[in-house]
Amino acid sequence: MDNDILYPAEWECDGPVLLALPHEDTDWADILPEALDQFRRLIEALVQNGEKVILLARSEAEASAVTEGCPEGTVTVAQIPTNDTWTRDYGPISVVRHGRLRAVDFGFNGWGLRFAADRDNLVNLNMKERGILPLGQYRNRRDFILEGGSVETDGRGTLLTTTRCLLSPNRNGGGTRGEIGEILSRELGVDHILWLDYGALIGDDTDSHIDTLCRLAPGNMILFTGCRDMDDPQFEELLHMRAQLSMFRNAEGEPYNLLELPLPDAVYDEEGNRLPATYANYLVTPRAVYMPVYGQPEKDELACQTVRVAFPDHKVVPVDCVTLTKQHGSLHCSTMTLPENIVTAL
């Protein structure tokens, strides 16, 4: 690891949260009013608990549909075009390089060429050109495909990710663990990479993003998606994932404390296809954990209580995310946290 490079943990980032507004040219078109209401409630939860928001939208007028009632100064609208709303995967990944914050602009190709991404891939460049990301803090690594939801760090040099995603041939030509790991070390300053080989949710379009499966937390802890129903088609895969997690060791050679999150009861779309609902897709800030819930009172509460064990000093804020699952994502996927001072005033 380059000791002059630090990839901070999510819970250490005390800046604005980046979101993108659904519009009729996104996949939300068929349920746009419902999608806008979902984002209105998410933004409301964020600003009521001390967060600031940068909202990508086509116009201030369109943004007003979800920001009405927000206190002045809590939401900044940036008029930048987007294909979709999953800012976690195309927003800038923030790194401290040689004592200075850098917003690293990695390439985004629609989760391995699955979906159109021409606008999303230009979001960070547009933010830089409009002065939202200061020129001196913007770092261009658009030659390397990396989605924010595919990597998880403890802020101390450890990275947790999945082989299915990062070694996908449709992202970086199927580079080896060694080749991809070398780039991650050079760009993010990590020196301890945990490669997870198991774990896949039905309906997931991301090739097993880590933020759908398991998350690092303070206290040498990993929260993971478990499955106790032997008849669930995901049971065996998630059991293998749990077994591999039990074999992982931290940078000091110690086993992790594993904390199991429940698997939500199956959620289906109108055609009967299972959607990838997961409680692991939460967002952490220095103040709060924003927890996706799915209208399942017992499991929703169990998930919230489990997260409280990992973040005892945080407020846990449940946000209904049933609508987000309809486009195969959830709360963390639709947000990108940024460190304080990484953006300038608009």
Image (tube, grey):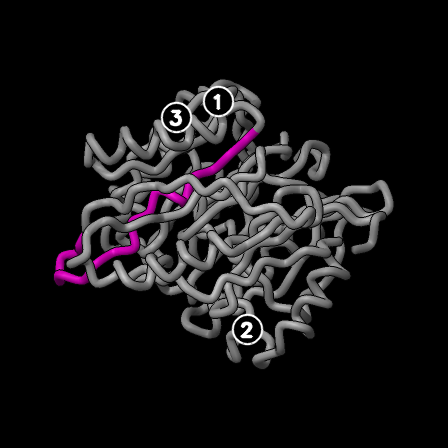
Tag 2 or tag 1, which sits nearer the N-term?
2
Considering the numbered disc 2 on the image, is that residue within a helix, a strand or a loop? Answer: loop
Q: What residue is shown with label 2? A: 167
Q: Is residue 187 left or right of residue 27?
A: right
Amino acid type at circle 2 is: Leu
Label 2: few (<14), some or many (≥20) within 10 Å?
A: some
Considering the numbered disc 3 on the image, is that residue within a helix, a strand or a loop? Answer: strand
| Residue 312, numbered circle | 1
User: Residue at horizontal 86%, vertical 46%?
Assistant: 98
Label 3: few (<14), some or many (≥20) within 10 Å?
A: some
Name the image quarter holding residue 154.
top right
Q: Is residue 161 left or right of residue 142?
A: left
Q: Nearer the viewer, mark 3 or mark 2?
A: 2
Q: Quadrant of the C terminus?
A: top right
Amino acid type at circle 1 is: Pro
User: Residue at horizontal 41%, vertical 32%?
Assistant: 307
Amino acid type at circle 3 is: Val
| Residue 317, numbered circle | 3
Vertical side of 205 occupied by 35: above or below:
above
